[in-house]
Image: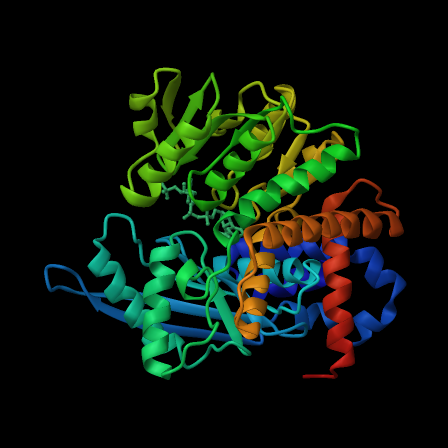
Amino acid sequence: MTDIIEVVKDRDPQEREFHQAVTEVMESIKPVLDQNPIYRQAKIPERLVEPERVIMFRVPWADDQGNVQVNRGFRIEMNSALGPYKGGLRFHPSVNLGILKFLAFEQVFKNALTTLPMGGGKGGSDFDPKGKSDNEVMRFCQSFMSELFRHIGPDTDVPAGDIGVGAREIGYLFGMYKKLRNEFTGVLTGKGLNWGGSLIRPEATGYGSVYFAAEMLATRNESLEGKTCLVSGSGNVAQFTTEKLIELGAKVVTLSDSSGYIYDESGLDAQKLEYVKVLKNVRRGRISEYADKFASAVHTEVDPAADCNPLWNHKADCAFPSATQNEINAKDAQNLIDNGVFLVSEGANMPTMPDGIDIFKDQKILYGPGKAANAGGVSVSGLEMTQNSMRLSWTRDEVDSRLKLIMKTIHRTCVDAAEQYGQSGNYEAGANIAGFVKVVDAMLDQGLV
Ligand code: NDP
């Protein structure tokens, strides 16, 4: 197994996040490969780590001063064994090929776990929407789509949102696609409710991560009621994780952005959360303003180069990392455990570094990896695709109950797969194994393509 990891590292030495994601999956599926020699004979590991297609393109646009700006656009079409490529677009200055390949690779297994017919992909740009006017964001999205449109389609590749891509960006992207293709189809998910979007799609990743946590807790006859929770991020996933936690009687005491975090000792309530939604989604302000508004909260700046993040060093029961990759290192993981945290449900993709995961597994806490715990978002995207094809809209309750059922099924699938390979209670192994087997069996059925 070391071989394939070394091959990947040698081939693209600079793609560190991709190496990390490949290593994590390949180590978990070793027992499956050992018991099923056909997978190695068919070079399944080698085929899985190579994207089916990588599209990389220039995105020129003009800012409000009339200056020409140039960004780089990407779409990674990773694996289509189970359905059209499906996965979000990320607009963030850190975006590069390695980060998008890691996200696309994770997406393949995550989508397999949802039970819906979706392959895996991911895309985005190093464009930073922060500080840009709506008109600048629109011009950027139009330029981005003027290339991407020829590679995507409702039966080919269906992008969605991710960091920096929310309802506003999806609207501009969809508008340009519709104009260029002269057709109104479900080519993107996360659309506005009155033009093809699904109820519960904005909420789905956060709600799903909380439903997954509730399932994990139920295995120990516990519930979220009365639990103190640490949430990171303050974007889409963090907001709806917080909303569902409050609804289920938990106390959320932290939120963050890339400048720092707030600790609110009295906990967030619905009114404070509404303030955060307007602050982040409408005013596009900083989370530090929360502490100016509410006396019970303090804001702490976080130095990304420090050896740990103080957000993870507060007394709590549960943690919901919902900002970005690699936000919990080994020291943070140990701090969480020392402060009483016994459940981590990952709303973000790959938020915990490998040595942090080892600590969670060694201490036998309930650890729900992103590819299982945050699969609710892509699941409801899949339900949005179904509604678009049927040309109808399901009610809020109908979508929410399907989401709950999918999260319950993913939880059960992880538990069963881990047990089958002698790793009871290890959700990381269970998610990787179950996702892997589903995808690669489809690849074998479809021949060498
Ligand atoms: P948003 O853009 O809505 O919010 C991202 C949040 O994370 C912001 O608060 C942002 O702060 C913070 N953040 C981003 N980068 C960093 C960083 N380098 N350091 C610290 N904080 C950072 O994105 P989402 O909520 O949609 O996504 C959050 C995570 O969830 C990502 O890992 C994403 O891949 C994952 N995810 C999202 C899904 C979805 O449906 N949206 C589905 C499944 C997973 P700031 O404003 O300062 O940048």
Give the quadrant of the N terminus: bottom right
At 31% from the left edge and 54% from the top edge, which residue is drawn?
Answer: 128
The single residue placed furthest to the left in the displayed view is 65
Residue 2, placed above or below residue 344: below
Quadrant of residue 353 within the rendered picture: top right
Residue 34, image x and y in percent?
86, 61
In front of the other: 16 or 161: 161
| Residue 330 in view (yes/no) | yes
Residue 161, image x and y in percent?
45, 58
Residue 382, image x and y in percent?
59, 64
**Would residue 424 appear left or right of 201 to someone viewing this image?**
right
At 41% from the left edge and 26% from the top edge, which residue is drawn?
Answer: 262
In front of the other: 250 or 288: 250
Residue 93, image x and y in percent?
35, 53
**Would residue 60 appear left or right of 331 to someone viewing this image?**
left
| Residue 12 in view (yes/no) | no
At 48% from the left edge and 21% from the top edge, which residue is drawn?
Answer: 267
